[in-house]
Image (spheres, rainbow, N blue to C red):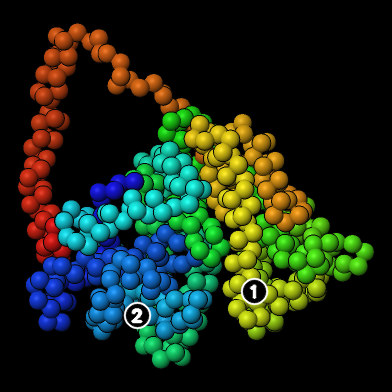
Amino acid sequence: MNNNEIDFYIPTNLNIREILKKEGKGKRYIDCQIDKYHWFISSIYLRSITDKRYESGDFLPMNYQVMEDNLGIRYIDDIKRILSENGIIENDGDFTVGVKSIGYRLTPQYQVKHDRILYDSDSTFIKKLRLAIPLKIAAMDDITRYTYHQLNEIGIHREAAEQYVDDWYQQNSLVKNPTLLKKLNKSNKKRREKEKIATAKGQQVKSIQLTYQQMLEKKRDSYLYQIRAIDEKLWLPNRDNKGRRVHTYLSNLWSELRQFLFIKSKPNTQLVSLDCSNSQPYTLAKIILEYFDGIIDSTTPTDVVRYIDLVTTGKLYSFMCQELSITDLDEIADFKVNMFSRVFYCENHKSFFSKEAKVFLKFFPTVYQIVMQEKKYQYNQLSIKMQRVESEAILDIALTNLKVKYGMAVWFGSIHDSILCEKGFEDEVRQVMIDAYTQVLGIAPHIKVAENINVVKDIDVAVQANLPDTTPLAELQQRFEAQFKSTPYKELIAHKEPEIDYRIRKRREAIERGIEW
């Protein structure tokens, strides 16, 4: 973790210092508090490009306790008011105690490219952010701290990964990708629905409908930031208090970038992943079994027996798609997503008439009634229960057992329902996962065949820097003299900006943007 680097991402057309001056704030207030405004804006932006659940233009829930811990209770309301009144942010007005925080987003005017501002100031706020890092590490539970140390061992072939993203961007810019277009239309529709809800709650919000090119640019920025996060260790793993999942830059990483990962101390090692088949419907089985005292016998409804048989053999999706005559891979993927969002994860009144709910009800009427009952009062509690079942099995039992047995000698990691490991340990990991899930649910899962994650590159692991250089001194001198006399070297020196001039220019640019360097 680069503990000494604090950076924020600010829209290129935004100058907070000038806005605070117009608000009548004095120089002392601006100098002391401007970093907090930048933190708030940067938090919204980074959340939109790193959290898979959201996209740019979405309302992003901002937990009040997190804001209070970082900004201080004296300044939160002032910061939100000034940013809102000056048309920089807007919110959805949607707040439910213990369920959802108010969502914020940048207004259309500031949905633009963001500049990275690197802070090296010694302001109280920046010092507080730096000091918070070791405190957060110390406060982690054992498995989260283990994950933190294991993630420090993960590297990424940055140059190759960035080139891959650039090629992806260029290719999809030249020819519009139908799949991406479909996702864009879907996200724009979802955004319009959220905007209607916000308007109904008395909020004045402007419509944000991304174009295809804007979507590509934001995805590119997101992928490049993910690469940088892994390479520079920008994030600390975080275990949430609801589903008890551990969130890391691996769990948020674009799957196409996994091929560039490697273990720093073992760069030639193949990494593999083992996933639980039908993992989310499978975790629901624990909740279903509780309605029958954990016993499946001749009195158990046949649809419950069928459901449990399908999820424990990993055949639920194939069964559903076969019954619906769905064979196209994209349609299968869409059906899985829609089944979760319209059966398991939405309010009951919104799922009654959906195609997915009707199909699920047809084949699994008893299971459907249990799902409806679990969501009756707070619809999100079912998904939280299911995530806790998964986290208990994967993190608290399986990964913990591997940690106890191997310590840091062997690399293991997790991405929610899956465990990542070095090739050669997959058979052991499979059994550990089966045992853990069986311990939690009482029924064994189906674990998929291990899949390779990364593409192993031939890397010379010998540490040449520790070996003595036996090149004769006269030969080294000739090499250096030839290099210094070369035309390319002279041109490079002529165009290279002196370090002192560079820092002066960067400081001037920062001050003009309203930032104390």
Q: Residue at x 24, y 68 (%)?
A: 36
Residue 463 visible in the picture: yes
The numbered disc on residue 134 is none
The residue that label 2 is drawn on is 90
Q: Residue at x 15, y 23 (%)?
A: 483
Q: Nearer the viewer, residue 117 or 128?
A: 128
Among the 4 quarters of the image, the one containing residue 107: bottom left
Q: Residue 442: x, y in percent?
A: 76, 54
**Mark positioned earlier in the residue sequence (2 or 1):** 2
Report helix, strand or loop for mark 2. strand
Q: Residue 1: x, y in percent?
A: 34, 46
Q: Are marks 2 and 1 in contact (CB under 8 Å)?
A: no
Q: Is residue 83 above or below residue 469?
A: below
Q: Residue 479: x, y in percent?
A: 17, 17
Q: Residue 426: x, y in percent?
A: 64, 37
The residue that label 1 is drawn on is 342
Q: Nearer the viewer, residue 74 or 329?
A: 74
Among the 4 quarters of the image, the one containing residue 123: bottom left
Q: Nearer the viewer, residue 290 or 95?
A: 290
Report helix, strand or loop for mark 1. helix
Estimate the spatial distance between the alpha carbons at disc 2 and disc 1, rounded to whole Å.
Answer: 28 Å
Q: Amino acid at mark 1?
A: Arg
Q: Left of 257 or right of it: where is 6?
A: left
Q: Residue at x 30, y 19 (%)?
A: 466
Q: Is residue 80 above or below residue 112?
A: below
Q: Is residue 154 above or below residue 220?
A: above
Could you classify mark 2 by the number of other residues whose Cα lies within 10 Å: few (under 14), some (14-19), or many (20 or more)?
many
Q: Residue at x 48, y 52 (%)?
A: 141
Residue 195 visible in the picture: no
Q: Is residue 371 above or below residue 402?
A: below
Could you classify mark 1 by the number of other residues whose Cα lies within 10 Å: few (under 14), some (14-19), or many (20 or more)?
some
Q: Amino acid at mark 2?
A: Glu
